[in-house]
Amino acid sequence: MRWGLIPHWAKDPKIGSRMINARAETVAEKPAFRDALRRRRCLVLADGFYEWQRSGGARRPMRIVMRSGEPFAFAGLWSVWTDQQSNRIPSCAIITTEANDLLRPIHYRMPVILPRDLEDLWLEANVDDPGALGNVLAPYPGGAMGVYQVSPLVNSATNDGPEVIARLA
DNA sequence: CCAGACGTTGTT
DNA sequence: GTCTGG
DNA sequence: CCAGACGTTGTT
DNA sequence: GTCTGG
């Protein structure tokens, strides 16, 4: 899937480049996301993510993982956009919320990570009241997570090797 | 009515 | 497609 | 988030 | 400076 949700009504798919994150606080109302919240929820799997910590002028990339080392699921939304030649382009976005205790010193927002026991609820097609999903979109407990500094090589999305997850000495 | 936006982040 | 602003 | 582009014409 | 792409 393309990262950056392209709403079905988009005239130009480039709009997706701006629809990378949806705020949990407003996702139910925003025209670009609300239909997807009701009917097209998904899990975006990961074993870590990055946040940049500001200190002075410098920006330090940090990697956040589960202490267990296990992979986990972000709360995601998806869409399919159809162009004039009937090509179907699938796309997705993840939802963000306020930072937990672990993340707060680094950055004030973080992705919504779903606890295992809520993954099924998130995917349920018959949850029609988006308000019922509101409680699900909470910061994941920081105690289960860990953070370490990584190389600025991760700043360029073209670097996609093991060097971008290596712990900085 | 029509036109234009439709988003988050961080920075000022 | 739907809402907001002019 | 950060990096990288930001433009058109004509020629190969 | 602002937008697009990754």
Image (cartoon, coloured by chain):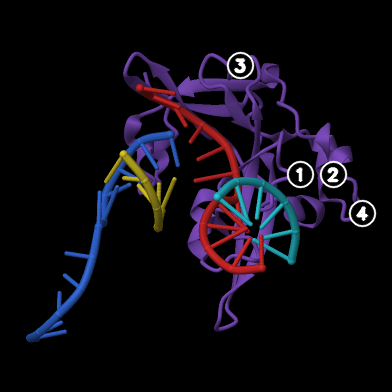
Chain colours: A purple, B red, C cyan, D blue, E yellow
> Disc 4 on helix, strand or loop?
loop
Q: Residues within 10 Å of mark 1 (few under 14, many from 20)?
A: many
| Camera-nearest label, 2 or 4 | 2
Query: Callout 1, which amino acid?
Result: Ala
Query: Which chain does tag 4 point to?
Result: A
- Mark 3 and mark 4 lie on one chain; the one further toward the N terminus is 3
Closer to us: A168 or C2: C2
Query: Which chain does tag 3 point to?
Result: A
Q: Position of residue A153 (x, y in %)?
A: 33, 36
Q: Compute the Cα span from label 2 to label 3.
A: 28 Å
Residue A6 makes an appearance in the image: yes
Q: Compute the Cα span from label 2 to label 4.
A: 11 Å
The dot on residue A102 is 3
Query: Callout 2, which amino acid?
Result: Pro
Mark 2 vs 4: CB contact within 8 A: no
The residue depicted at 62 percent of the width and 49 percent of the height is A93
> Disc 2 on helix, strand or loop?
helix
Instruction: Identify the residue position indicated by label 1 in the image.
Output: A28
The residue depicted at 41 percent of the width and 19 percent of the height is A54
> Disc 3 on helix, strand or loop?
loop
Q: Compute the Cα span from label 1 to label 4.
A: 16 Å
Mark 1 vs 2: CB contact within 8 A: yes
Residue B5, placed above or below residue A137: below
Left or right side of A71 for A54: left
Q: Are marks 2 and 4 on the same chain?
A: yes
The dot on residue A130 is 2
Q: Compute the Cα span from label 1 to label 3.
A: 27 Å
Left or right side of A51 for A133: right
